Amino acid sequence: MRFRHRLAAAFTTLLLPLTGLVGLATPAQAAAASSAATATYARTQDWGSGFEGKWTVKNTGTTTLSSWTVEWDFPSGTSVTSAWDADVTSSGSHWTARNKSWNGSLAPGASVSFGFNGSGSGSPANCKLNGGSCDGGPSVPGDAAPSAPGTPTASGVTETSVKLSWSAATDDKGIKNYDVLRGGSKVATVTGTTYTDTGLTAGTDYSYTVQARDTADQTGPLSGAVAVRTTGGVVDPPPGSKVKLGYFTEWGVYGRNYHVKNLVTSGSAAKITHINYAFGNVKNGQCVLDDSYAATDKAYTADQSVSGTADTWDQPLRGNFNQLRQLKAKYPHIKVLYSFGGWTYSGGFGQAAQNPAAFAKSCKAVVEDPRWADVFDGIDIDWEYPNACGLTCDTSGPAAFKNLMSALRTEFGANYLVTAAITADGSSGGKIDAADYGGAAQYLDWYNVMTYDYFGAFDKDGPTAPHSPLTSYPGIPQAGFNSADAIAKLKSKGVPSAKLLLGIGFYGRGWTGVTQSAPGGAATGAAPGTYEAGIEDYKVLKNSCPATGTVAGTAYAYCGGNWWSYDTPATIGTKMAWAKNQNLGGAFFWEFSGDTSNGELVTAINNGLK
């Protein structure tokens, strides 16, 4: 998609420099080492390039503590970048956290936690609490944290329950119990190595991990995750039913103020079958998380969230991923795919094509990260364009795309969706001819054929033309630049009709300086747009520049010297009828936030594909 330039995030994270934190700390050490208190550490989140850590100080003695100081060492390359509920300072690799004025006093049995964001991959060592051992004993450092338990196995799965079993963790002082986590949130603490989780929802995906606690209540690392789907519930659509898929953009939570809950309030969630979450990045030949704040960290209040429950600062997963988890719980029929690439991030696919197996392995690791393993049902690859030019030019050869898709299917297996968004250039010798889309189709569930962005003010002088023509028409500026020709070419290369989805844009493209209403007029440049010149959402255009005609199955509008083309509910109805007549697998659209608040365009797609 030509217009998928990443919008500059309106959010910036305020990190106090550590030199500033030094001035906030009191210079004196706590007066005496206490053997009647413990300090335990847990890594509560990990996003690859950084992590969130939490220390908990507990008064295990019989007298009140008036203050506390926790010290530890990090290995080279690991550091604290911001902290809360404590004043954190450093001297080289040695870190010191002192209580705030309001949380230093701890009565017997009381505890307090403080947290921090960090960079690097190391863990604390040589812990001291008020100069003594962090485990309440005389030795320094305290005892080691437990090992990770074995990855749980699931048995006895019913509509509402599952039995989990795992191999024991080890610890130098002994294991006290285990925390069982469902979707990253603790649901039980047990002394044995089995647990039966009940009260589940039929036909729903869950993910479980286990974490051990030692006799000092220190927690070890999480086990591997096991995915479980309860029986019964909403079944997958029957064979032959149509896919109705929309893209949800990661950056939409900023300037567009569009969130997962909008899919509920607009009524769209009940009318779609799939969501592509856009976009993961492709760097150094690997899939990587792009914006961790939007994806996993952004906190939602109760009124903003799908579930109506507010996020807490210490929950394992927040952001869009947690909201998508809540959406799937509310609408179990929806499948979510993680889309990688797009116009801006396609430059990394050339390197990925040099080692398809390693690329596929990296993608599986991101999609099935234990913190959100239950959120995604598959992967979508949006490579713009294999062996052709988009924002950058790729020269990996005509077989590269097929090889990459083969590796992804091998890695993900038959139970995951593997799809791709591809060019709709139906011209002779064009982008469809540049890669082996026919050969790759055997590995994919479907193609999202991007049948839009054919014409626009990237050609500032015009001529004016619809950006998403369904068919050719007299005077079309470029032969083969229309949906019908693109679909026909893909079919001729052996792609089954049922594996082709027709693309719809929930936006218009426009020119300014135009003097005629009919298509084919000259222009002087791009028409003004809310976020980018030459582009505007349907929800704006339907009122600011209503349609004045149709051409090639798409609406156009002429107003005040501006000329726009975009799809309306009526033209979408025409396109859906055409897609059904062609026996296509369904339709997809870019993207949810361009629609009206009551989901006019999603409704038109849903009605047209029934």
Image (cartoon, rainbow, N blue to C red):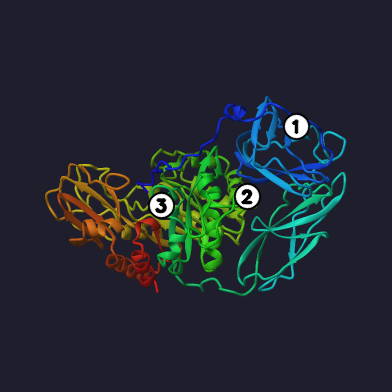
Mark 2 vs mark 3: in front: 2
In terms of image quadrants, where is residue 551? Answer: bottom left
Q: Amino acid at mark 3?
A: Asn
Residue 211 can be seen in this image: yes
Position of 359 with respect to 74 (left or right) is left
Name the residue that disc number 3 marks: 257
In terms of image quadrants, where is residue 126? Answer: top right
Position of 89 with respect to 129 (left or right) is left
Mark 1 vs mark 2: in front: 1
Residue 203 at x, y percent in the picture: 60, 71
Badge 3 local density, few (<14 within 10 Å), some, or many (20+)? few
Task: Report, in whole angstroms, how far the alpha carbon at label 1 lies from the one at label 2.
Answer: 27 Å
Mark number for residue 553? none
Q: Residue at x 35, y 71 (%)?
A: 581
Q: Nearer the viewer, residue 573 or 591?
A: 591
Name the residue that disc number 2 marks: 314
Q: Amino acid at mark 1?
A: Ala
In the rendered image of this protein, does residue 164 appear above or below residue 130? below
Q: Amino acid at mark 2?
A: Asp
Residue 35 at x, y percent in the picture: 84, 39
Mark number for residue 30? 1
Q: Nearer the viewer, residue 584 or 437?
A: 584
Tell me how many marks there are.
Answer: 3
Mark 1 vs mark 3: in front: 1
